[in-house]
Image (tube, coloured by chain):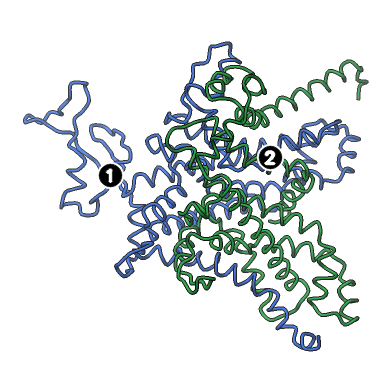
Amino acid sequence: MAAVNPDNQGLRLAVRYAVLILIALIFIGPILFMVMSSFKPDLQLLQDTSSLRAFLPVGDLSLENYREAFQRAPVRLFVINSVIVTGATVVLSLIVCSLAAFSFVYLDWKGRDVILSVILATLIIPFETIAIPLLLLVSKLPWIGLEGFEIGWLNSYRVQIIPWIADGLTIFLFVQYFKSLPGELIEASRVEGATWFQIYMRVVMPLSGPVLATAAILKFLVMYNQYLWPLIVVQQEQYRPVMVGLQYFFQLNTAWGEIMAYLTLITVPVLGFYLVLQRAFIASIASTGVKG
Amino acid sequence: MASSLKNPDRTGWAFALPGTVLILTFIVIPFFFAFALSMTNQRLISPNPTEYVGLKNYRDLLGLAVVTLEPERDDSGAVVIDDDGEIVYPRLRTITRSDDYPQYRGMREWFRWQSGEDARIVIASDVVFMKALVNTLLFVLVVAPVQGGLALVLALLINQRLRGINIFRTIYFMPVVVSIVVVSLLWRFIYDGSDGLLNNVLSWITFGAFQPVDWLGNTETALGAIMAMSIWQAVGFHMVIWLSGLQTISPTLYEAAAIEGASKWQTFRYVTWPGLRHTAVLVLIVITMQAFALFAQIDVMTSGGPLDSTQTVVFQAVERGYGKQDISGGSTISVILFVIVLTISLIQRYLTREK
């Protein structure tokens, strides 16, 4: 190759960064606009869209929009509901799916391979194609709770949690990971007389940090951002999660300041979580790429 | 314990049981349920017993026909022309309400074109569903290649060895963690016809030459606007998948290419792209499946409007199955959707198979 003169190289570097920065602005611009607008009164918010001020914390800034958002809708309740549903599903999913995967990888039992292939085959079924029949199914399912026996799961936490605990992708991720663990460890524990449950708890789980993080992050994103399912199975305010709660803001008179405040409120915790754990977030998305 | 040693079947079953039961109950059964329900008149709540109706639901959704209308003629047999110079045709209901054509009963006009003096009219049992089907296919046909391609470009940019490159990766991925519902409501404001950010930015870049557009209120721009926003939100996801594919390509291949004096394009064409084959298949199938599921954007931004220009298959399934409590109609749409998604995934797999 011909010698590159240093000026030329410096220019090329500058162009590269310019391209990267320009693209970054496209991705971060709308998010920045949302956060900044949430602190501005409606009138100023609308005026600011005509200049760069839209992306800057300038002018009359206050928490007024947040206060009004809390008045318009039971925001606190929606947040609590989302935390309950998301938290419970993530924890139960990690337990149930890792146990099943443990069984598929380490234990030899009749019917194992058939069941595993059925579970993996469900990966090609988009949720949207089963939502309507599932709606009918859960409306007829029995339940025994504190109030006794009842029929129908609509309007409850359980209808938002239980159908989402087990899924093909999570089981698949655990299966792949367990297969990569050294088999000698398990055999050694068997020789020492450990039960399978002890091996699961004391040998395999302590080694499963990375896959637990991956599965938890993916489930968290799915559950917290859930919209279609709670929309059709929850009509009572009491059980509504944050995304469905959004409907309080785009009906009737549109007050953009309040909307931006609510959007910021339900998004910033997730963004913060992402920024702190970004390596784990990106690694978990990347690991979905090994299927196929 | 001795019992579990002698009886590994029981332990294996016990461990796998909760997960298996949940997947069977909430995924596999509803999946087969959809097929069964699509042949009934099941409603969410109904005093009447459910009846088997065969393929009626499919006919009601997919019924299509082409009919020909001959122009009106006056007594002398000449074609009647109206004041605007257009040929006058009898009304479509002379066919769709006629006892001579019971097979066309209840069907409505989807679109028409002229063939000589005659008008040919495509009539459909469910015009809205037909529009939803076309919009959804259009969405997939545009979004799958564009989003996949842009994601690859971003992955190649991010794969450079530059100081601070991780900051850019973090930013490009950011919209992925934001809920599509939040994104849709935010972009409703960005797309607004009067105070919208996009119109202002465009007029600013073009020094005022750009005329504001009501992006979501216009039949020509609404679906495109939703496509652009959906790509903006999800492209980072596929960028990360391409990136992990890029990182599996052995550096020695690049070194060899450099020694051979390969140009940048040759290196991409003969080293990078062949190494991404599996990733490409995966990205394409995943985007296609996600694109077919288009729902939240529509529900939050347009509710299918204006004039059904953003109706989609899933939006229709929900509107019937949930909105109108017509479980069988919603299930029929679900089955049609599944068959389409499966067919397209199989075709994609076949076209990209190892030769």
Q: Are marks 2 and 1 on the same chain?
A: yes
Q: Which residue is painted at 91% across and 25% down in the image?
A: A1
User: What amino acid does circle 2 point to?
Assistant: Gly
**x%, y% of residue B223?**
48, 35
Most foreground residue, A37 or B354? A37
Q: Can residue B355 be seen in this snapshot?
A: no
Cα gap from disc 2 to disc 1, whole angstroms = 42 Å
Most foreground residue, B224 or B323? B323
**x%, y% of residue A143?**
51, 71
Q: Which residue is painted at 87% across and 32% down in the image?
A: B261
Most foreground residue, A240 or B240? A240
Residue to which mark 1 is pinned: B108
Q: Which residue is painted at 43% across and 52% down in the image?
A: B317
For chain B, the rendered hue is blue
User: What amino acid does circle 1 point to?
Assistant: Arg
Q: Which chain is green?
A: A
Quarter occupied by residue A95: bottom right
In the rendered structure, find residue B236 and report the number of the disc placed on it. Answer: 2
Q: Is residue A137 left or right of residue A257?
A: left
